[in-house]
Image: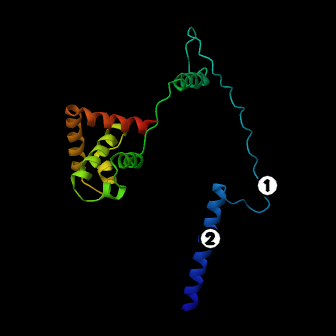
Amino acid sequence: MVALHQEQVTERQARASSSRAERLRRLGVVRPAGEAKPTVPARRPLATVTNSKPAASAPVDPVQNPMAAYEHTFWCADLVSDRPFHPRRPKISDIQRAVCQHYNVTLVDLLSIRRTAKLVRPRQVAMYIAKTLLLKSLPDIAQRFGDRDHTTALHAVRKIEALVAKDVSLSDEVELLKRQLQE
């Protein structure tokens, strides 16, 4: 009985391995012994791409000339690259460092949970500058300022906006910090 069972198991294993080998041969993963290595078909030559503007009189037909659309795309990309230089975007860490230097506070204090007047105003200014100069969301900004809630950053932005409209000296400080960061 045991011998019969072992014969059935080995027969199943042989069938499974042979069918697996046959599937791999059909898929081309394994070549039968003695079969030559298949040749790689020759590649088509690459089309030449020009940077010249496509002729306005000749309509671009992608069926007749598939490269015409690419030529037009490259020509448009050349126009885009002639844009004037834009100032670099600072990182939140750059903003925090500049505000700390300007207001003479440490980065540890700026990111701490303390709410003294000496620390709150620089923190709010830094959040305001981060929101105006960067394309970051309020939750991202608030998280980088000591893992705060996004409503804290929202309050800081609104508060500094209102104070900048009223207080000329604060407005000058904020503009000075923005110019320093964009250099």
Q: Which mark is on residue 7?
A: none
Question: What residue did someone put label 2 on?
Answer: 17
Q: Position of residue 56 (x, y in %)?
A: 56, 10
Q: Quadrant of residue 163?
A: top left
Q: Does residue 52 appear to the left or right of 149 in the view shown?
A: right
Q: Position of residue 55 (x, y in %)?
A: 59, 12
> Which amino acid type is marked by label 2?
Ser
Report the residue at 59% width, 76% height from top.
Answer: 13
Q: Residues within 10 Å of mark 2 (few under 14, many from 20)?
A: few
Q: Is residue 38 left or right of residue 129?
A: right
> What residue type is disc 1 on?
Ala
Q: In which quadrant of the rendered image does the N terminus lie? A: bottom right
- For the point 31% across and 57% down, the residue is 109
Q: Quadrant of residue 18?
A: bottom right
Q: Gap in Å between the C-alphas at discs 2 and 1?
A: 23 Å
Q: Secondary structure at mark 2?
A: helix
